[in-house]
Image: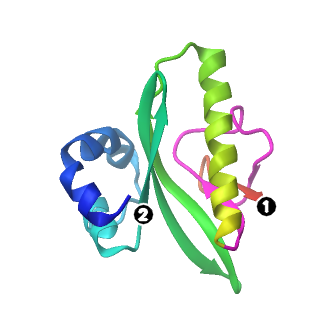
Amino acid sequence: MLPAAIEADWQRIGALLAPAIEIDKNAPSIGIHALLMSGQYAAIQVDLPTGSGIAVVEICELDGRLVWWLPYVAGLVGLGPKATIAALREIMSGIEKLARSVGCWEIRIGGRDWSRVFPDFERFDDVPNRLRKVL
């Protein structure tokens, strides 16, 4: 999403992201809105037949390689547990393709414990629930 689209839809986007940001002890002090408006973070709109969501993305360099970091993902899926897991895996597959297309060699996620949803990801540091997958 371009900054103008984020700004125009900020009331909905901010409300979706608020619970995830509120529990994040490492949330940036500048604020997610400012990071999205500056271009340091980007937002991807995720649409499903039964719901929608937002993925916040930061692409950063680590050891000379690009890493696709998903600090926040939020939304409403509107499916049962098994169908939700299948939908989340399909969304992640699309995100992996996007990450590869811009030259990223790894995806990192955090927040809640995603290890059962994404069993092909591995833990990578001492911060709880942080996972990564080499692409």
Q: Earlier in the sequence, mark 1 or mark 2?
A: 2
- Work out whether 66 lies above or below 23: below
Q: Main secondary structure of the magenta part?
A: loop
Q: CA distance from mark 1 to mark 2?
A: 20 Å
Q: Position of residue 123 (x, y in %)?
A: 73, 52
Residue at which label 2 appears: 42
Q: Nearer the viewer, residue 30 or 127?
A: 30
Instruction: Determine the image quadrant of residue 22.
Output: top left
Instruction: Determine the image quadrant of residue 117.
Output: top right
Q: Nearer the viewer, residue 68 or 101?
A: 101
Name the residue rendered at 42%, 38% in the picture.
53
Q: Amino acid at mark 1?
A: Leu
Quick one: which residue is furthest to the bottom in this view? 64
Asked if residue 115 is among those painted magenta in the image, a careful observer would answer yes
- Work out whether 77 lies above or below 99: above
Q: Is residue 4 left or right of residue 119?
A: left
The answer to whether residue 126 of the structure is visible from this angle is no
Q: Amino acid at mark 2?
A: Ala
Q: Which of the labelled discs sits on residue 117, or is there none?
A: none
Q: Is residue 39 left or right of residue 122?
A: left
| Colouring chosen for the image of the structure | rainbow
Quarter of the image containing the C terminus? bottom right
Residue at which label 1 appears: 135
Label 2 SS: strand
Q: Position of residue 110 (x, y in %)?
A: 56, 50
Q: Which contiguous range is marked in magenta?
A: 103-125
- Work out whether 68 lies above or below 91: below
Mark 2 surroundings: few (<14), some (14-19) or many (≥20) residues within 10 A: many
The answer to whether residue 93 of the structure is visible from this angle is yes
Q: Position of residue 112 (x, y in %)?
A: 54, 40
